[in-house]
Image (spheres, rainbow, N blue to C red):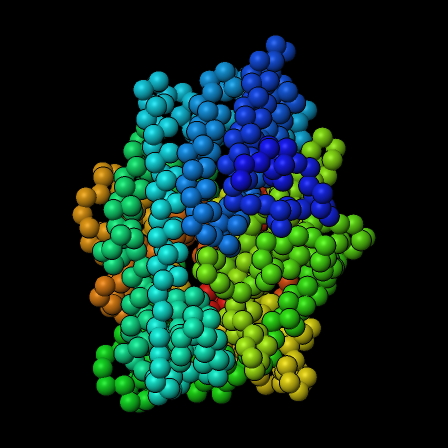
Amino acid sequence: MPFKESNNPLLAKYQTPHQTPPFTKIKTEHFIPAIKQAIAEGNLEIKRIVSNSAPATFANTIEELERSGRSLSQITGILFWLNSTESTPALQAVIKEATPLLTRYANDIALNEQLFARVKDVYQGCDRSKLTTEQRTLLDNTYQQFARSGVSLQPQQKERYREITNRLSELSLSFEQNVLAETNDYQLHITDKKELQGLPDTAIAAAAEAAKAKKLTGWVFTLQEPSFIAFIKYADNRELRAQLYKAYNSKGFRGNQRDNGKIIKEIANLRLELAKLLGYSTFAQYVLEERMAEKPTTVNDFQEKLYTALLPAAQEDLAELQRFAKQAGAKDELQAYDWAYYAEKLKKEKYAVSEEALRPYFKLENVQQGIFKLAGKLYGLTFVKNTQIPVYQTDVTAYEVFDANQRLLGILYLDLFPRVGKAGGAWSGALVTQEKMKGLAVRPQVGVACNFSRPTATSPALLTLTEVTTFLHEFGHALHNLLSDVTYAQLAGTNVEWDFVELPSQFMENYAYEREFLDLFAVHYQSGKKIPQELLVKIKEMRSFHSAFGKLSQLRSGMVDMAWHSITSPVSEPVDVFENKANRHPGLLKPVEGTLLSTRFTHIFSGGYAAGYYSYLWAEVLEADAFKAFQEKGVCNKDTARAFRECILSKGGTERPMVLYKKFRGREATLDALLEKYHSKS
């Protein structure tokens, strides 16, 4: 039913606590009219900057540009968050319609020569000594964004730039939607109870609930993370493990209407064309110019060095598992779909404990409170549930976050369970970014989304140790946004160089293995008893279990990413042929026929990690070194935490990452702490 623009909740002042989105009033049909109006407002703001007859200054040009388009940012922040957590065909249609509008708006700004002329005047002529460090960074970033976006291209080249960026937006969206559809559509339906042998009761109960929800008898396993991982780890039925593994790892590579092969090649070739249009030989060179690594050779050298350091330990991991599998009765050669199964059994034998045995100590509600308490011990934060804040789904809970002086820091949304329409994996993002806009403090609104096992009829939601680590990781991203204390949104929170953004998140993972943290919450959900000391020792020992093998796999993914974005001529060969060549180091386990990484590699083809997947391991070097500083004085030492907050978490992208890191640590990080962490042999 048509509605007047004034009735569009996205365009009105929110009558909600802390100006949080009025999710209960927002309908799918509200988005496109709101986006169109917000774009019109943004264009007027740009026009006012360009038409200003006064000489260009930092205040009337750089600051005004930085603060333009706020309504649009607010609306799209809601739209894209909902598309990842609560996607529907109707919402996907909105995204498809909105994408070219948003790309055109961004290009109209980036290619505006008059606007760039004013930016250039400020960049070349202002007195930098009168600017703060943050203002100088904003000025440099703004100038570079224009210089790197084609504003100086010839008219015909500009038109091609627009065509390429618009097409890339469409392709990335199609890639993501294909992977989501492939994930949602698959199910392994089991009716014979014998085929469940080896599976823990929690996984069987969840599968029974899934079958019931689909009005089926028996048990249903899906490609959602909790279901898939449990089956691959514990199911004795090797044939079914192989079936599920192949389904998961062939997403987008099945030769059907959702095949991502052609999309990938077009994305890679268009990114190459874009880079060349802007004067770069490869897309990786273009991307890395603004990263800590700065150039492809640095990334390649880093990955090779780490690969060489980890290889001996990874080979030992594999040899050990092969021996164990043979002793356990395995007659066939070890395959990729056997790794997790036998690794879990070997881990249990070596440490006399399994992840399943730890679940009773990791009741989800307790883990959540433990993480909140940890943030309190480190940074003085408190979290207060507020049921008056509207949420977009009944699973979601909203919290007010306060600092030690009971000042509101921001809003945190927790969305922790899988469902149809929600992307797989785990992530965090800011719906509203922190800033100090014309003296008014805008507090961040941050979401954390995970896919943890739901409670069943017989037990509460119980996490694995891996899931506890995942929760800590995403919470680290949330803290980076919540503790941000900068003037400009463009430099706030996680708006940092991409190979620095994982430092706060991976840093938090360390606490999953620390008694001081576990003692805050880890009690058996039935008996109420704390984790025994001997179990805590084993948890810490388990951290390095076959870690080298896992890191090697991660490295090879980074190498595939760099290969796709280091091409110097268009790719014409099939994607599987290209990927096999890109993996210049042979895998320790041969690939399973019919599976492929690239066609489901959302990080690089529909996320922000193109030529940047290496950043997880790059940041892990930083976080291992940073956590060493905490270990030296106590993992919850307030002085160390204060320094980490002041030098890293609160600063966002106001200075270059290594400058910030050296302020905290007093020196650059080395590989030593990372290799020590995983007991690697080099």
* Residue at the farthest left position: 573
Tell me how many marks there are.
0
User: Where is 163 relative to 241, above or below?
Assistant: above
Question: Which one is nearer the viewer's eye here, 213 or 197?
Answer: 213
In what quadrant of the picture does the C terminus appear? bottom left
Left or right for 151, reference 70: left
Question: Which one is nearer the viewer's eye here, 669 or 299?
Answer: 299
Question: Where residue 317 sits in the image (x, y, percent)?
Answer: 36, 75
* Residue at the farthest front position: 1
Q: Is residue 625 visible?
A: no
Question: Where residue 45 sits in the image (x, y, percent)?
Answer: 59, 23
Q: Is residue 175 visible?
A: yes
Q: Which quadrant holds residue 251?
A: bottom left
Residue drawn 75% across the image and 49% down it: 408
Question: Where residue 273 sits in the image (x, y, percent)?
Answer: 29, 33
Residue drawn 26% across the image and 63% down it: 595
Question: Where residue 278 sits in the image (x, y, percent)?
Answer: 36, 28
Residue drawn 67% across the image and 31% down it: 132
User: Where is 9 relative to 554, above or below?
Assistant: above
Question: Which one is nearer the viewer's eye here, 456 or 200?
Answer: 456
Residue drawn 27% across the image and 70% down it: 589
* Residue at the farthest right position: 405
* Residue at the farthest top position: 53
Q: Which quadrant holds residue 47?
A: top right
